[in-house]
Image: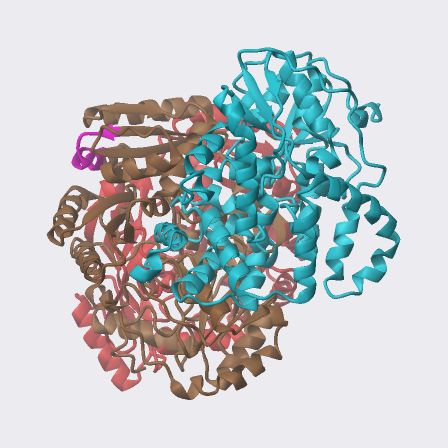
Chain colours: A cyan, B red, C brown
Amino acid sequence: MQTRFSPEQLADSHTRESEKILRSCVHCGFCTATCPTYLLEGDERDSPRGRIYLIKDMLENDKPANTEVVTHIDRCLSCLSCMTTCPSGVHYMHLVDHARAHIEKTYKRPWHDRLIRSMLAAILPYPNRFRLALTLGRLGRPFAPLLAALPGGDRLKAMLSLIPKGGLPQTSSDEPAAIQSSRQVAILGGCAQSVLDPEINAATNRLLARFGIGVVFSPGEGCCGALVHHMGQEDNALGFARRNIDAWWPLIENGLDAIIITASGCGTTIKDYGFMLRDDPSYAQKASRVSALSKDITEYLDTLDLPAAEPKSMVVAYHSACSMQHGQQIKDQPKRLLKNAGFTVRDVPEGHICCGSAGTYNILQPDFATRLRERKIKNIMRTTPDIIAAGNIGCMTQIAQGTDIPILHTALLLDWAYGGPEPTAIRSLS
Amino acid sequence: MNAPAAPQSEDELAALIDKAVSDRAPLSIVGGRTRGSIGGRGNGAPLSTRALTGITLYEPAEMVISARAGTPLAEIESALATKGQMLPFEPMDHRALLGTTGTPTIGAIAAGNISGPRRVSIGAARDHLIGVRLVNGYGDIIKSGGRVMKNVTGLDLVKLSAGAFGTLGVLTEVTFKVLPRPETAMTLSLDGLSAQNAVSAMAEALATPFEISAAAHVSANASAPSLTFLRLEGFSESCTYRAERLSKHLDNFGTLRLLEIDEGTALWQRIRDAEDFAGSDFATVLRVHVAPSKAGAIVDIAHANKASIMLDWGGGLIWLGLAQGADASETIQRISEAGGHPMIVKSAVVTLPVLTPASPAIAALARKVKHAFDPHGIFNPGLLAGHI
Amino acid sequence: MSAIAFPAPDNTIIVRRDEIIAGLARLVEPECLVTGDDEMRPFETDALTAYRRMPLAVVLPRSTQEVSAVLRYCHDAGVNVIPRGAGTSLAGGAIPQEDAVVIGISKLNKVLDFNIANRTITVEAGITNLAVSAAVAPEGFFYAPDPSSQLACTIGGNIGMNSGGAHCLKYGVTSNNVLGVKVVLIDGTIIDLGGDAMDVPGLNLLGLMIGSEGQLGIVTEAILRIIPTAEGARPVLFGFDSSEDAGACVAAIIAAGIVPVAMEFMDKPAIEICEAFAKAGYPLDVEAMLIIEVEGSEAEIDASLARIVAIARQHGVRVVKESKSAIETAQIWKGRKSAFGATGRVADYICMDGTIPTGQLPYVLKRMSEIVAGYGLRVANVFHAGDGNLHPLILFNANDPTEQAKAESAGNDILKLCVEVGGCLTGEHGVGIEKRDLMGVQFNAADLNQQLRVRAAFDADWRLNPAKVFPLEGRTS
């Protein structure tokens, strides 16, 4: 559609990129139909097309963000369902990232909003701080009803409810010794997942070793930056990205087959490093290389041609994380792998709609997140599953809050099917 | 009755209407005079379209035919037959039922929205009418729609005219979408079902993908058991295949019996024309348009009033024949209360309204629409009474 | 600049904005009333983005009663009203104005009743077209009209424009598939037209309402006819060396007594655009392509396709490619249905919607290329060949005002051509604001006056969607 940017505005790389995106949008409205918040609200302001329009108006007129616009952009899950739907190829992700950075620069949020955001940004990306916070949070859980009465208290309450009920899990076994192989990969250790469910990477490690893939460690890597990136903290996000690139670079120079990611939310961001750092001459090339090497674990395994495993009488509802199916367009590989590993795999009806997790969304937008979770669980139940499989820790935590059916990472199920230990959740099933 | 005025051209017709308007002299529009008072009993000087004849356009490859309003239906049907085509909605011929003579015209098919058994699958006359020319109560010659089947340009006065029984203007030319005549037809019968079970059987059949083209139920009388008919049409291999699948699907209703082709053809004409209700046995004949889910209730009312019934359109159309002495007025009221839309097709009692009145809000709106075409109430006063 | 004029907004209304907003605020929940300048921005246009006007306010009611209350208020306050569904109109049917309140029905999106015995579904009008089919699919049914925007467009909008789609060759358009509607009139009166029975006797106001483009009332509920899904369906792709051959093939198939469920045409530019998005396996080395779909059992499909392929061979078909799986079929249709949006990848476009007698296809295709080339622009053709409903996409650069004017002129010339050969201005998108000023090409004064008088029977003060459908001059009634 038509745009009105001045040459001066277009001198800015972000604006230039956004203008290109806006030009490709034909305002057909297809995206509204697959947007979770539009499905809930039936209000164009809470749809991709509406948001694109709000962003266009804000950017074209160099307007500082205001409360109304921020409300509707904040409600966006960044699930990117709209990008899968869009026939015109509008890169909504880059547009909304730009808008969030613009909001961060030009809008002053209420104190409680600022507080919770800085708290999340200061804790979640750092495993040690996160572990400590979870321990303290468990002590704080009895105060949840009191907190709910404070401004923004519904978010604190939502945050407390996400804390795992038992103690923090430990890995079931020691990591296998690194094997020597012509094919070497790095596995992203990341942040929150390593605290919430360290077994995921342990299982991934065992699985890869079993098929002759060497795993190398990359000290110094950590959070991918997605958490702060989605809050519009661009500089902070780029800092995380550069740190990870620095950590991986020596390994890449030694010859690396792939950087394996076991949380699809991180995968979407790391695959975007190349774009995020495009204007940084000292990192642009390295970032593109890192993005190109990044593979979701299922995407990588799918290239290995694994043997078929013994059939199991177990129905798996495969929940495709938005970052998996929309962000990375990985759709069939996980299901193919699970089927090949002997599971009966069922698609979840309305599977393209987000579960409401979306990074820190379930903390920052508890109302929408809860409605989406309920909708998701209702759809999952229609497949009458024994277990739920997913490839993203955020979805797993979110969905687990609303159902007793075990939810496991795809890698855990595959590891078990190919000779690894039986996951605890499954042991307790039988 | 006087010989009606029968203008030779659209312009002549328009001039005649102009005069009627300035004289405030109501007109009663007639075609072949075969359809009695099915839209209501009019009073006005008769004006006939019978001199406006001739097919004006027929493009078989585009599946479209246009003709002047007074063109005999038979002429249209034979022209279509030469190209292996047909009017898809199988218009009813009222002559047997009403004991009328004369020649049915294409204009009346449009004005009365006259459809037959195939309506349930492929739509009504209204659904196939894609263009009209008419003279309104200002004496203006108006066109709406055209000769293409997808056309949303402006308000759809075509659909509005269909079934308006000439109350909005005099149709001078109509254009219909037509379809290829099916290679063959196959009629299957389920014997001995009650009307209620027949409605269920027809609903099940119509919910299958086997493309039932018509579904009717002829009720028991002293000399014959009740029969439920399903018709399949298309290429013969396809009909055979669908008949087999259908037999399996409906086996809990009994065994499907295949009729001979000629027997089937005669049967569907008999159903189309409601021939069973002809003659003097019935003082009043009603047709009731109803949702099939409510057909059972209408059947109960019919039985309570000792009416003979026949179901068409899978239960969506119920014919009722009431004998002399039955309380037609009370039956009609109860049918309306049960969610049916009764319409008197034939009655010995001329004081009964042909249609049950519309709600006040809708009637008020319809009167405004009528006024927009016919401000002086020239056309067919008395028709669609209670509705406009 | 934009060539289509809007009536001058009524300043006496605009100065009363605060009072009107306060009045509306008494009728709906706060989250259902949009009044901030920034927040109303997304409602300033639909899918005809060349034209944009900010509304006075936007209301998103949650019930028929709320629609009624808002309409009654606007009627009494003398405020114009713009009905809006999903805002996917390509004809600008939902574009507001500064003195008008938008009433959007997108929150009215529930299924109210699904009656298998009657083969009907009753829905609120803001539900999307595809959601209706999705709701009845588990029971083996679908809702037949399938406009390309069916994923997003609402049933209310479909009723407003009498939408068609690729499969209406066999199943008809919206007006053939609606049994009843609940309508709110401009004064707030709620009426039910038609009903759950077929062909309810009386004046056919239902038929009049369908396709009336929000000029007569706001539809809030509808009873829709649903159809059993065929046992199977299979499209075949035919590639031809010329559009003329493809057009002749279509005519020959119909003449042979075969009515496929769909017959879609694409020319080379359209094939390239759609294939790039959908990767449907369209042949890229042909000048024109037909997608022809038939339904039934496997054996029936085989038999029908054999007949169709034989006819195509007589008309010089070069590529014949049958779909081999449900996934392939879905991809083939995804490509076709995304044609307009996918065109956005290469250029801005305006999409025409004229219908022509199918016998005129070869002539019109040739003339259209000449017309568009005459303006120095390009065209991609995608259309419903079986019924002659053309969708030439005229490509241009929206940031270049002279190109936009040229594109509009080329579009007007094409529509005039459609009428000249016996067709019409719009087959399924509606007149909207886009074709309003061309109405005189298809209708004479008497025709238009009759429509205007009918319109006045519903809305004498021109409150409903006032800038649309009818030319601004000559609105005397």
Q: Quadrant of the C terminus of chain B?
A: bottom left
Q: Is residue A108 left or right of residue A288?
A: right
- Name the magenta segment's main secondary structure: helix
Q: Tell me where residue B175 sits by quadrant.
A: bottom left
The residue lying at 58 percent from left, 24 percent from top is A186
B358, above or below B197, in the image:
below
B83, above or below C198, in the image:
above
Residue C455: where, in percent of width, then height? 38, 74
Number of labels in the image equals: 0
The residue lying at 46 percent from left, 56 percent from top is A49
Residue A15: where, in percent of width, then height? 39, 55
Q: Is residue B32 left or right of residue B204?
A: left
| Residue sitting nearer the eye, B88 or B325 | B88
Magenta residue span: C239-249
Residue C121: where, in percent of width, then height? 57, 51
Is residue C353 part of the magenta span, yes or no?
A: no
Q: Tell me where residue A239 sits by quadrant.
A: top right
| Residue sitting nearer the eye, A195 or B254 | A195
C36, above or below C87, in the image:
below
Q: Quadrant of the N terminus of chain B?
A: bottom left
Q: Is residue B142 left or right of residue C141?
A: left
| Residue sitting nearer the eye, B326 or B47 | B47
| Residue sitting nearer the eye, A311 or B73 | A311
Q: Is residue B92 left or right of residue A228?
A: left
Residue B226: where, in percent of width, then height? 61, 39
Residue C210 visible, this angle: no
